[in-house]
């Protein structure tokens, strides 16, 4: 058995992303920010072992949601975030957050520079089971749920 503890997201500006996730979804800083710079030398790097030897400079921070699942934000500075082209339909392509008020959350996403990608869908007629795709200002897709996954899809 396994449990999801956090999801890693690449962003072009760590400080702006930290601020956005704190304002929009009330995440709190758990640890960091941390910085890695290959030019500082030293013993073998855990960062390069995990991220690849091509990483020369980056920053990261762990944020925590009220539900106990975290987001680790990465600002890849060398090579930079903008030098890589994401594949939209391969591997991981979105995260899902359960929110108290889905309409209010959409409004906060948009108000703070994100966008609504889809209409809001009720997936179980007669039940308050809604979902919508949104996007942070950095291009990461965030699906919002009105209930947890087991309520949304259990016994369908």
Image: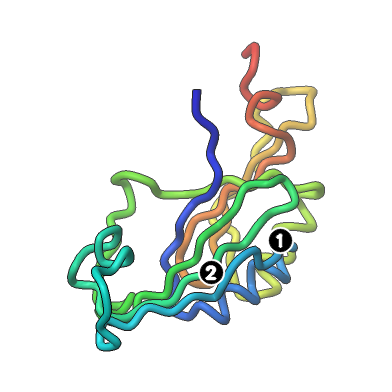
For the C terminus, the quadrant is top right
Q: Position of residue 103 (x, y in %)?
A: 77, 53
The extreme left residue here reads 53
The extreme bottom residue here reads 39
Does residue 149 appear left or right of residue 104 in this picture? Answer: left
Question: Which residue shows up at 26% across the image and 73% down it?
Answer: 43
Counting labels gives: 2
Q: Secondary structure at mark 1?
A: helix
Residue nearer the viewer, 5 or 100? 5
Picture quarter containing residue 153? top right
| Colour convention | rainbow
The residue beneath circle 1 is 25
The residue beneath circle 2 is 61
Q: Position of residue 26 (x, y in %)?
A: 74, 63
The label on residue 70 is: none
Question: Which residue shows up at 54% across the image and 61% down it?
Answer: 135
């Amino acid at each position: 058995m396994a449990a999801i503890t956090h999801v890693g997201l690449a962003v072009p500006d760590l400080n702006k992303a930290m601020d956005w996730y704190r304002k929009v979804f009330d995440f709190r800083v758990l640890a960091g920010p941390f910085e890695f710079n290959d030019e500082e030398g030293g013993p073998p790097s855990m960062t390069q072992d995990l991220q690849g030897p091509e990483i020369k400079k980056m920053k990261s921070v762990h944020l925590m949601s009220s539900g106990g699942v975290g987001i680790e934000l990465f600002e890849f500075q060398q090579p930079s975030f903008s030098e890589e082209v994401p594949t939209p339909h391969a591997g991981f392509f979105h995260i899902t957050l359960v929110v108290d008020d889905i309409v209010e959350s959409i409004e906060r996403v948009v108000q703070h520079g994100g966008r609504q990608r889809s209409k809001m869908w009720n997936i179980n007629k007669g039940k308050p089971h809604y979902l919508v795709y949104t996007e942070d200002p950095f291009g990461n897709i965030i699906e919002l749920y009105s209930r947890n996954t087991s309520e949304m899809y259990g016994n369908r």
